């Protein structure tokens, strides 16, 4: 561990990659929150696949191999894919799942056609283009990371500038329109930022796994909060941490590419959140469920006792525990619990209702009636 | 055409058919993306199966991997049921994680496994004829031809056997439950068939092309017809056509066959998307434009009907009152004149008798908003079509 941190400060490559994946995780987590809340989770998957032909075409046209040019191509082709998907869902009766799957596979196939075509070109030095398929964090250089930081900074600035607009469009699009906002512009702006984040990550994690980097941090942080600001911040943190941690794991082992490891780390965050989130998590939900069930049984027993006590002038007249035997809701534990609450008192083999218990049962009865 | 060439085209065509049939139902059930999820998520199943069998075409491996596909579906549905995230997020979370596990499994055992992520994802149809089925020393043709051929046979026989059930569960799950046909059984049956098809096909054409072959023909056919049987036939046609023409395009360009097939599918879809007679983009846009004009026309007629005074009916007044651009006002006026709905005398516009009757009918429709008012109008006038 100590050694790793030393390496992080001294080793140039490792530092660059760690910084790159951290920034990437942060921007994806940040913008992924919007994608998830807009129910456009799988748009990311489609966009990342749709970006592939853009990379190949940019290379074919310019012959350049620097990531700036290629990513510009990816951005254009990703945007074309996105708006074609919009066109299909709004102008035909095909549903969004069909449109997404269609654009995803067709653009990817076209990209593969171009990539294999480039590979067969005699003069082209195509090596390095296929890193966009599965991503190679190891190929990140300082200029790439600088580009990432710049783009992240700009996106953050735009997001803060349009925070109110983004937020209101997210939760009530019709209301936004009636308030006089240009919803089309805001919508395109959010989509553009999401496409930008995806394109930025292609080099590091590749087209196949990109969507998970976008979704997972947001899905995890959603479990912990109902506040948009907190959610965006939290998912940016989770994203960044997944990036750093995933890079560390993959660097410490041979033959482990960074992309899949980052996805698994982010996936672990999601799993943890699904189970342990206090409000929405499965574990606490089950515990609450059980507790409610016991409470219900306890009240049922109390009601039964109330029924008996009602027939006597002295409500605290003792009765034999035996008479509860026919009644299924009662156990030794539940009697103890009732006594603990101060609703009954137990002496030997007999129980007696306390005034407090009587009142409790009466109130419950009234409550039921009122409803 | 050489022998391997014919074999490649045959395999491509059979894969296309085997994918098109489940694809139609996936598209109709709005589950197209499940095919994408399955095609990625089977990777760990394939890897583990490969450890056991050491043969990519072994039936055991196909079953194991297909089982992973069904597990993916179950997992997605479980996450969805917890209500913690939406369905699409559930899909988007499950398959990358499973795919990552597969990639890592391959990477960690790179020395023992003769298996390549690129190959799984992209496939290489050109190599398919070289892996031959040898039985008793004689050559029975390419293995993948046999594998996909049997999958296609199974799919077709299941389709013929359960056509009615599939149809009713797809379009009305409630009705099918009442009729005693379990939608759940049909659902998982379809999922299993899709998984097996994806697994069988990935080796020949790659995981992504499988998605293209499943969704694209069905989506294209869906733009042309609303009849289930016709849709299946059309999908088969599109699939086979793209498989064979895609092969020749790849041959000319010397590029990936699966990529070229997907591209051909895309070109066909684009053509149908633009030019389909009723559902195509051009006809939809044309219809929307027509409807806009027709609504303007009604607004105009109602305006005339409402105002007796001449100043309101002056030909130049239109622009300022209803706030139309000059060109649009001109179009609407011309349209009204052409249909004998209005007359112009000294630049003052009058409703004709026909125009008056028409206006009253449309008023009645607007007030009642009942369909029976509009039915006779559809025949009398050019309005309200579509």
Image (cartoon, helix red, strand yellow):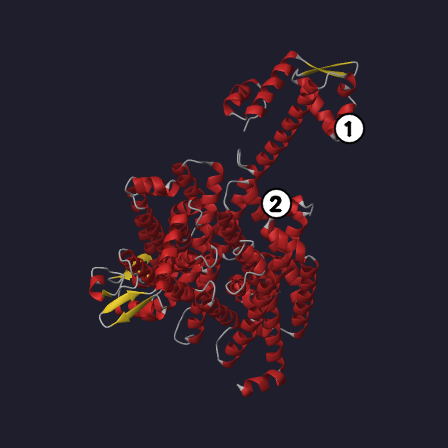
| Residue A120 placement (x, y as % from top left) | 56, 62
Of the pair B301 and A172, the residue shown nearer to us = A172
| Residue B85 placement (x, y as % from top left) | 48, 58
Of the pair B116 and B178, the residue shown nearer to us = B178
Query: With A346 as the anchor, is A194 left or right in this view?
Result: right
Residue at image coords 65%, 45%: A177
Eye-nearest disc, 1 or 2 = 2
Residue B320 is tagged as 1
Task: Tell me the quarter of the picture where residue B315 sits.
Answer: top right
Q: Chain of mark 1?
A: B
**Looking at the image, can residue A76 be seen?**
no
Relative to B31, say whether A330 is above or below. below
Relative to A275, say whether B242 is above or below. above
**Looking at the image, can residue B27 be seen?**
yes
Residue at image coords 63%, 28%: B295
Residue at image coords 56%, 55%: A50
| Residue B181 placement (x, y as % from top left) | 29, 43
Q: Which residue is mark 2?
A: A174
Task: Tell me the quarter of the picture where residue A124 sits.
Answer: bottom right
Residue at image coords 69%, 57%: A162
For the residues tagged 1 and 2, is the chain the same?
A: no
């Amino acid at each position: 561990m100590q050694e790793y941190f030393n390496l992080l400060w001294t080793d140039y490559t490792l530092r660059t990659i760690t910084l790159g994946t951290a920034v990437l995780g942060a921007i994806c987590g940040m913008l992924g929150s919007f994608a998830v809340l807009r129910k456009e989770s799988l748009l990311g998957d489609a966009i990342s696949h749709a970006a592939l032909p853009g990379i190949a075409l940019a290379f074919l046209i310019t012959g350049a191999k620097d990531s700036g040019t290629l990513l510009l191509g990816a951005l254009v082709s990703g945007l074309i894919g996105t708006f074609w998907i919009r066109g299909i869902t709004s102008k035909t009766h095909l549903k969004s799942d069909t449109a997404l799957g269609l654009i995803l596979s067709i653009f990817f196939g076209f990209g593969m056609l171009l990539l294999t075509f480039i590979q067969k070109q005699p003069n082209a030095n195509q090596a390095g283009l296929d890193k966009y398929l599965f991503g190679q964090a190891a190929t990140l250089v300082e200029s790439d990371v600088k580009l990432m930081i710049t783009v992240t900074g700009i996106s953050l600035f735009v997001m803060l500038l349009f925070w109110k607009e983004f937020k209101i469009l997210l939760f009530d699009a019709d209301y936004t329109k009636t308030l006089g906002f240009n919803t089309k512009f805001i919508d395109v702006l959010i989509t553009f930022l999401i496409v930008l984040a995806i394109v930025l990550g292609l080099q590091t994690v590749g087209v196949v796994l990109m969507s998970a980097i976008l979704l997972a941090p947001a899905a995890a942080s959603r479990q912990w909060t109902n506040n948009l600001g907190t959610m965006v911040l939290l998912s940016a943190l989770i994203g960044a941490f997944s990036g750093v941690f995933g890079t560390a794991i993959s660097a410490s082992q041979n033959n482990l590419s960074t992309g899949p490891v980052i996805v698994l780390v982010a996936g672990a965050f999601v799993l943890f959140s699904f189970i342990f989130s206090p409000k929405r998590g499965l574990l606490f939900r089950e515990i609450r469920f059980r507790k409610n069930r016991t409470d219900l049984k306890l009240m049922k027993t109390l009601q039964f006792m109330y029924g008996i006590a009602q027939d006597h002038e002295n409500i605290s007249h003792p009765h034999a525990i035996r008479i509860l035997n026919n009644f299924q809701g009662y156990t030794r534990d539940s009697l103890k619990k009732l006594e603990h609450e101060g609703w009954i008192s137990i002496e030997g083999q007999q129980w007696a209702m306390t005034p407090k218990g009587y009142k409790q049962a009466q109130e419950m009865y009234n409550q039921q009636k009122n409803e | 055409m050489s022998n391997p060439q014919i074999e490649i085209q045959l395999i491509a065509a059979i894969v296309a058919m085997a994918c098109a049939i489940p694809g139609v139902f996936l598209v109709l059930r709005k589950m197209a993306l499940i095919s994408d999820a399955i095609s990625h998520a089977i990777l760990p199943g394939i890897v583990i199966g490969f450890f056991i069998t050491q043969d990519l075409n072994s039936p055991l491996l196909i079953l194991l991997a297909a089982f992973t596909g069904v597990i993916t579906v179950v997992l997605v549905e479980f996450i969805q049921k917890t209500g913690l995230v939406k369905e699409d997020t559930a899909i988007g979370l499950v398959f990358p994680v499973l795919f990552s596990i597969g990639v890592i499994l391959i990477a960690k055992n790179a020395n023992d496994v003769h298996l390549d992520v690129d190959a799984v994802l992209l496939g290489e149809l050109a190599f398919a004829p070289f892996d031959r089925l040898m039985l008793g020393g004689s050559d029975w043709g390419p293995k993948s031809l046999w594998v996909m051929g049997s999958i296609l046979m199974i799919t077709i026989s299941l389709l013929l056997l359960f056509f009615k059930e599939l149809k009713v569960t797809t379009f009305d799950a409630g009705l099918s439950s009442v009729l005693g046909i379990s939608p759940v059984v049909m659902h998982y049956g379809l999922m299993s068939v899709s998984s097996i098809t994806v697994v069988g096909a990935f080796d020949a054409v790659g995981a992504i092309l499988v998605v293209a072959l499943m969704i694209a023909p069905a989506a294209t056919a869906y733009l042309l017809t609303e009849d289930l049987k016709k849709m299946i036939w059309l999908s088969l046609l599109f699939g086979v056509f793209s498989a064979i023409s895609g092969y020749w395009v790849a041959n000319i360009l010397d590029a990936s066959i699966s990529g070229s097939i997907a591209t051909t599918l895309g070109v066909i879809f684009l053509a149908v998307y633009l030019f389909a007679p009723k559902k195509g983009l051009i006809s939809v846009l044309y219809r929307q434009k027509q409807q806009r004009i027709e609504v303007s026309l009604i607004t105009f007629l109602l305006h005339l009907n409402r105002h007796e005074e001449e100043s309101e009916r002056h030909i130049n007044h239109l622009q300022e009152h209803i706030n139309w651009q000059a060109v649009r006002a001109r179009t609407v006026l011309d349209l009204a004149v052409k249909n004998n709905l209005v007359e112009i005398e000294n630049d003052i516009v009058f409703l004709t008798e026909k125009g008056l009757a028409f206006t009253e009918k449309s008023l009645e429709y607007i007030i009642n908003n009942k369909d029976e008012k509009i039915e006779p109008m559809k025949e009398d006038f050019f309005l309200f079509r579509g």
